Image (cartoon, helix red, strand yellow):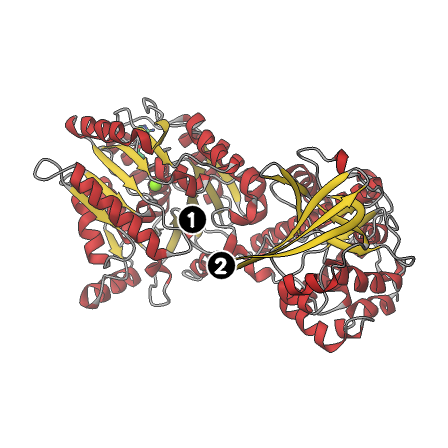
Amino acid sequence: MQDTGQYLLDKPIEFLKGVGPQRSEVLKKELGIFTWLDLLQHFPFRYVDKSRIYTIREIIPGTQYIQLNGIIQKVDLIKKGRVKRLTALFADETGTIELVWFKGIQWIAKILKPNQRYTIFGKPTYYNGKLNMAHPELDFDTPENPAGAMPLEPVYPATEKLKSKGLDSRGIMKIMQNLVKQLSPPQLPENLPPWVIEQQHLSPRFEALMNIHFPENEQMLKLAQFRLKFEELFFVQLLLLQQKSLRHKRFKGLRFPEIGDLFNRFYKEQLDFPLTGAQKRVLKEIRKDLNSGKQMNRLLQGDVGSGKTVVALMCMLMAIDNQFQAAIMVPTEILAQQHDQSIREAVQELGLITALLTSSVKGKKRKEILAALMAGEIHLLIGTHALIEEEVRFKNLGIVIIDEQHRFGVAQRARLWKKNIQPPHVLVMTATPIPRTLAMTLYGDLDVSVIDEMPPGRKPVQTVHRTDSSRIRVFGFLKEQIGLGRQVYIVYPLIRESEKLDYKDLLDGYESIVREFPLPQYKVSIVHGKMKSEDKEFEMQRFIRGETHIMVATTVIEVGVNVPNASVMVIESAERFGLSQLHQLRGRVGRGADQSFCILMTGYKLSAEGKQRIRTMVETTDGFEIAEADLRLRGPGDMEGTRQSGLLDLKIADLGKDQQILQLARDIAVKLLEEDPELEQSRHRALKAYLSSKSRHQFNWSRIS
Ligand code: ADP
Ligand code: MG
């Protein structure tokens, strides 16, 4: 076998030339690099074009990373209080540029020599009209290190700790060179099937790995990137899809053959509006799952207010009609209470027994509920995550609905399956629209349904952007709305480094609002995370009942609270919120028949990205459009619900930018598994071997499902 080669890549990192025990420690700690193979998979995040040396005169605004050659003329250490910086004037035949360092000053000061010739790399910028370059890389011009020796030099991510051991980008490059020198194609056997390589014109694995570190040229680099991104996404998809089919094989799904009395009576007698086309379509999709003999794992996406709850309720009725119990799990106590109330009202006539279970249901009451669940006397349970606790057992749980999914980790989802001998059907509902590509990766094992239509007569929330100078007019508008009998939210961010400052903002804001809206005419509630939960509850309930006019709050109100009479959402320091959060907040209004408004308050100065976010909010109310914009602006790592997944530590693919490659990878994975579900064909032998070695070594797939 060709195993000898793979052993080489399995070698501990300390045995690579140039590494040794000390450096291996930081490589392990900082980058999780334990073996030669790990190092090989530490990819550059950009490349410096060293094929050409620029002149200072050629620099124009927008010039990217370039290489300059010239002489250091003068070095200055500048101190302002405790802030220090080091500057140097750098000149070539055509002009001068100032070089600046804010960090590592002592070390740089030692090696910077006036009148010495250097080749420098960096990104020029204009500061106060003057050209400068912060933290350039420096190279002495020496014979063994001539400028332009490498057409595209890799730049590796490195941390301060790595740098302190000489493993800055250059240091990493040197050990990478030592590694790459020892490799040949048999050590990196192809892991994709030949037909895929051929069909997609992919570069071979060995060639791609060589070129990703040390590209021969631009073209080879592009090919290497495409191949490695494809490979990465393909394996994620393949494993997710395999897992799904395995699950289908292992677990039989509960069958709900009856569309029974409860469902029909609810539909004909209780429901006081016609379902939208989208709601009907989704119900059909779910209905099919519930009688397929396979366990349903479905993600239901639908914008805030699109009417997911009624769909959930009707799904639960399908289960109860078939003599099963149903449960719905929501992320907060307040939401649980709201659902409890509205669901109880809706199903009372049908003679169903419901119960509410949260962590504040204690003692005798709790015991009674737990016993009734075991005995099958409760048809429908509404609860918070208290519901997944071990002690909560059902007689025969048929379906679980998880509302506002992103607050629940995947592991929690899995615990639900154990609530019945045969796992119950699971419907995950989210109002945070996730772009298709991201859903495919994060929830690749789920089927996806979308409610993409709002109930009729809903007026889109009118959104405007205002700065402090219009504050008086904004307050006037709020008074008008309150005069019409409406209620108002005013939300403050809580995301700054210093929480103390945030609370100060909130409390200052509250004071000025109380001054502007005095008693007895106006009543103002305040709710924030530092309050005791009873107090929070109490204030929320007052606002829900319409006893106060204004709700001043931090983002605790973000999720799901339903006050149809609230018609204005004012968001303070709106530039500090992410797009999906802004969208969620805006979704708190526009739930009734009246025209609603969202006012985004910001300072005058906004970053380009901040401006883009505000503009997006003003221009559209479509959650999917907003989610796509969010993904483009921030990248997937920051998106709601992705952080804890661990699935997004993709090494090279970027879910924001590589959506087409992801789609391609998924399509091919689907096709491959359709043709060869067990990977038994000889053309898939290498693939299968690679997968099993990979799952042994690297992946922690338990995180996913
Ligand atoms: P969300 O998807 O945000 O959970 P809800 O289920 O809370 O939305 O629905 C928002 C409001 O719209 C509720 O008051 C609900 O009764 C109402 N609603 C739901 N579906 C329809 C429909 N087809 N026609 C009219 N109103 C509807
Ligand atoms: Mg909802």
Closer to us: 297 or 12: 12
Comparing 524 with 466, the one in front is: 466
Eyeballing the image, is 39 above or below 660?
below
Q: Residue at x 23, y 40 (%)?
A: 346
Residue 523 locus on image (x, y percent): 14, 40
Residue at 55% x, 49% y: name it.
Answer: 637
Q: Is residue 380 visible?
A: no
Q: Quickly name the residue at label 1.
A: 405
Whole-percent x and y of residue 231?
73, 49
Q: Quadrant of the C terminus?
A: bottom right
Q: Is residue 47 left or right of residue 260?
A: right
Query: Quadrant location of the N terminus?
Result: bottom right
Q: Is residue 689 above or below residue 451?
A: below
The three-letter code of the residue at mark 1 reads Gln
Indicate the amino acid at tag 2: Gly
Measured from the top left, where is residue 259 in percent x and y? 37, 38
Residue at x 73% of width, y 77% of height: 21
